[in-house]
Amino acid sequence: MGINLKVISSEIFGESATAFAVDLGSQYRKKLANGQLQTGISIQNLGTELTYIDEGESLPLTIRPGVSYMKELNSNAFLVACDIPYYVNEEEMLILFGFEYTYNKLFSLRGGYRLNLDDADKEDESINIGLGINWKSYSLDYAVGITDDLSMPHRVSVQMKF
């Protein structure tokens, strides 16, 4: 279980606004004879509005349940996952599927697919692929998304665990 408290500050055309929010989450892990099952749920951006002068803007409230299954094979692992975020303000639900294969606890290959893109004008990626490298407490991840118009947004992240 976890909680995250946030103070959000924004400025548009010289007008500033501040909001306060909380993220809540819980996760359950169950070891099975042939792998590990995890379920979880989070509520993100539960809080006040950003108010500019007299106009309030709601934070993007999201309810996000998910489930994953991981099978370890010696020093390798295979993970499949499903995430179902519900965007309360937009009244939109997505279904996200993903997989990850990790070789020798060092290299990872990932892929994902997004269902329920209700709005055809969106340029969200329906397919994502990526790789990762883990070394001691550091990791480097790269992903590329493929959109309907064949643009390719790239993402890079670096992590240090302590």
Image (cartoon, grey):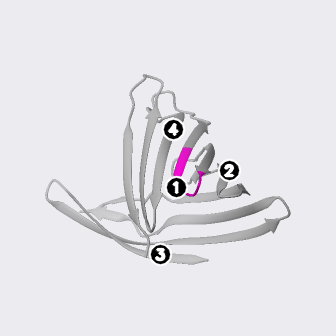
Give the CA distance from mark 4 to mark 1: 17 Å
- All told, the count of numbered labels is 4
Determine crowd level at label 2: few under 14, some 14-19, many 20+ residues with C-alpha closer than 10 A: some
Which residue is the site of mark 1?
106
Coordinates of residue 1 in the picture (x, y in percent): 61, 77
Give the CA distance from mark 3 to mark 2: 30 Å
Coordinates of residue 102 in the picture (x, y in percent): 59, 51
Q: Which residue is at 62% across, 47% downward?
A: 101
Q: Which residue is at 21% across, 64% downward?
A: 16
Which picture quadrant has residue 159? bottom left
The first of marks 3 and 4 along the sequence is 3
Residue type at mark 2 is Phe
Residue type at mark 1 is Leu
The first of marks 2 and 4 along the sequence is 2
Is residue 108 shown in magenta?
yes
Q: Taking 121 as reference, is 55 above or below it?
A: below
Give the CA distance from mark 3 to mark 4: 29 Å
The first of marks 3 and 2 along the sequence is 3
- Of the two numbered discs 3 and 1 in the rendering, the one whose residue sits closer to the viewer: 1
The first of marks 1 and 2 along the sequence is 2
Q: Which mark is residue 78?
A: 2
Tell me the element at label 1: loop
Coordinates of residue 86 in the picture (x, y in percent): 60, 52
Residue toward you, 52 or 121: 121
Give the CA distance from mark 1 to mark 2: 13 Å
Which stretch did the figure color magenta? 103-109
